[in-house]
Structures are given as structure tokens and as C-alpha cells.
Image: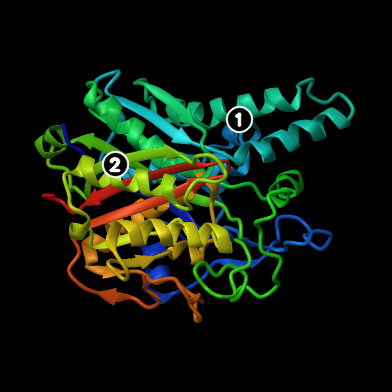
Amino acid sequence: MTAVFTGLGLLAPNGAGLDAYWSAVLRGESGIARLTRFDPEPYPARLAGEITGFDPAAQLPDRLLPQTDPVTRLSLVAAAWALGDAGLDPADLGEYDIGVVTANTAGGFEFGQRELQNLWSKGGAHVSAYQSFAWFYAVNTGQISIRHGLRGPSGVVVADGAGGLDALAQARRLIGRGTPVVLSGAVDGSLCPWSWTAQLTSGTMSTREDPATAYLPFDERACGHVAGEGGALLVLEDERAALARGARVHGLLAGYGTSFDGHPGAEPGAGLLRAARQAIAQAGWQPGQVDVVFADAAGTVAADRAEVAALTHLFGPYGVPVTAPKTMTGRLAAGSGPLDVATALLALRDQVIPPTVNVRHPAAGYPIDLVTAPRRQPLRRALVLARGYGGFNSAVAVAAPGG
């Protein structure tokens, strides 16, 4: 069984929609700026990758708006775009032939804050914060299923930043078990005071005020990351079914690996290295056959050093081009991994590696070939890496059509 990507629905701070996003990425255009969703002045971190100039509510039925939060609305739009890009009308499929698997980490905060505000107001909803999170995860996937009539297997994966890649892997498993089509990925993020306060406790958010210097993975000035919202939903299909209906194939999900970090004294990057090796081995590749790596790019010294150690162990010093287009969007929680997969597919299509922006002073002792300007070269295979808070690691191997 081979699972192929046939539809892409992208929403990012630097571009809403496939063409807008990809054009911005190749221009090196960042969507990171001062937060406008709420007043960030009382908080030490004031920048975000915020989707502005695009109103998802304008593309949705009015009846959905009271039932949904901003992230769910973005997810609904991305789902519709992915199905449209795939040329799929679920009504043309069997009743249980298309499922949904998404990932989420932070979106529930905004939903939960709204419920808490209802509690504080007269006649507000009588629901606990914990219930609101549970509802959110069900609502996000459920609204997609209901709106498009997707009655096949469904689920939600929660593994912070690694979860989006895990969702794609689960989609591939479902295809292997007989579901012809699965809509999968993640649109994530939460730009509300409650979420912002929670994220700040990690100690990994950048507090710089200049968007050009706030998020600098692998740079000697690295000081943390910028949080954002967005991501990608992708249509995966059984390759035989996709070819039978004449679908355009963006690429294939060739391999997947996952791991959990060991004890605090474990070798830096060992967990990520295991995940990357698993993905490459499952794809049937040798490390030297990987043409580009889309890095997790945490933006802190310790995490960057661990990722460089993993890459160096696997590919050797300067052994493979490495890029982090998320420097233009910020880290989108579970949404970053699927967005990187979609970006990798576009890179394979156009034979160009997108840039890591703003990194001008790579840290000494990091022997990686970091791509800081668009680089044209032959591309057939890409490796996408993602890590989640608490020790989650995931990797996906993506190949151009035909393998």
C-alpha cells in the first residue's frame, strides 16, 4: 500500500492559500509581527505569527460561527481547500470511504477562554475548563466531518508540535486498513491571553521586539521561538485509487518514525535521531538519498544543538541541505509539521529549497548546510522533522511522484 498526497489546504501568517503562501515563502516574506488579537503590552512576549487580512468567517455559513472558535474556522477553510485541490467531492465516494484525522495542541485554549468568559457573565454556560478542551478537540474534527459528510474513521492526535506528523501517519495506517481517502494534518495555534500565559511558562518564547531578530534557529543569537497560528490539511489517498480516478499526485508519504526522549542525561538529539532513522528506513532509503531536511528549528540553544547533533550523526557534517521556512511563520504548534510537509511537496514540485530567513550568524560548532536563500537543485526526497514539548519526536519521509 502506498499513500499519496492529492490535496493541499494551507493557511499561514505569511499567506492564505497554496499560491499566496508559496509565493511569500520564495520571496522570504515573514508573517511575524506584533500581536493584534489582544493587547500584548503586559506580557514579555509581544510578537506572533498571526493570520491577518483573511477572514475565514466570510467563507463559512453564518450558522457555524456561534459554534466555532477562530482555529476551527481556519480548519474548516483549509479542509475545503484541500478537498478542492484534490478534485474530490465526498458525495461521489462510498458512505464510509473518507475519514478525518487531525492534530491539535493549543486551539482549545481560545475555546476554553470563551467558555470561562461565559461562566463569568450572567446566565453563562455551565461547563468546566476541562470539558471545554474535550469539546474543542471533538468539535474541530467533528465540524469538518459534518460539513463535508465524511463518515469514515476519524480521530485527533495530541503530541504538541510532533502531533501533526503523527496525524499524517495515522491517516496512512487507515488507508492501509482499507479507507481509500483520509483528510489529515493540523491547523493550530491560540492567540488569546490564557494561552499566551500558559505558553510563556515554557521559558522558550522569544521576548525580542524586532521581528527580524526574534526567532533565529541555529543562529548564535538564538533566544527562543515566536508562536503563531495556521498549518495545513492534506488529502491522502491510496495510490491505486488516486490514479484510477485520474488525480494529480503531489507526492507520497514514503516513511514515518516516532520516538520519545530518554532520561535527562541521554545524549542530546538521540530521540530525534531514532525517529529520523525510522522514517528513512521505512521509506527504503539510505541517508545519502535525502535531498533536503525541513528542520524542527526550536530556536533555543539546547534544542538547536540537539537537532544539529542528530543531523550530523545521520548525514555527516554538512551532509544535506537543511531549511526552516517556519522562521517566516513562527511555530504553529501541531500545525507546523503538516505545513512543512506541504512546503516540502511544493519544493519537490518546483525543484527549489525555500529559505531560512533572518539567520545571518550561524552558531559556531553547528556543521549543517543551512539554506538561507532559495536554492535551486534537483530534489526527489525530503525529510520533515518535528518535536513536541515534553519529549515527543516525529519524522516523515516525503517523495516526489513516482518515488
Q: Are marks 2 and 1 in contact (CB under 8 Å)?
A: no
Q: Secondary structure at mark 1?
A: helix
Structural crowding at the residue carrying mark 1, measured as other residues with C-alpha within 10 Å and reported as few (<14), some (14–19) or many (≥20): many
Closer to the observer: label 2 or label 1? 2
The residue closer to the viewer here, 338 or 88, is 338
Q: Residue at x 16, y 44 (%)?
A: 284
Quarter where residue 149 is shown: top left
Structural crowding at the residue carrying mark 2, measured as other residues with C-alpha within 10 Å and reported as few (<14), some (14–19) or many (≥20): many
What's the residue type where badge 2 is placed?
Gln
Give x and y (percent) for residue 36: 71, 61
Give x and y (percent) for residue 57: 57, 45
- Quick check: 283 left or right of 221? left
What's the residue type where badge 1 is placed?
Phe
Quarter where residue 91 is shown: top left
Q: Height in image: 398 above or below 366?
A: above
- Quick check: 297 left or right of 65? left
Q: Height in image: 230 above or below 291?
A: above
Q: Residue at x 60, y 30 (%)?
A: 136
Label for residue 136?
A: 1
Q: Secondary structure at mark 2?
A: helix
What is the number of callouts on the image? 2
Viewer can see residue 79 = no
Quarter occupied by the N terminus: top left
Q: Residue at x 50, y 75 (%)?
A: 363
Viewer can see residue 165 = yes
Q: Residue at x 57, y 33 (%)?
A: 64
The residue tagged 2 is 278
Give x and y (percent) for residue 396: 32, 46
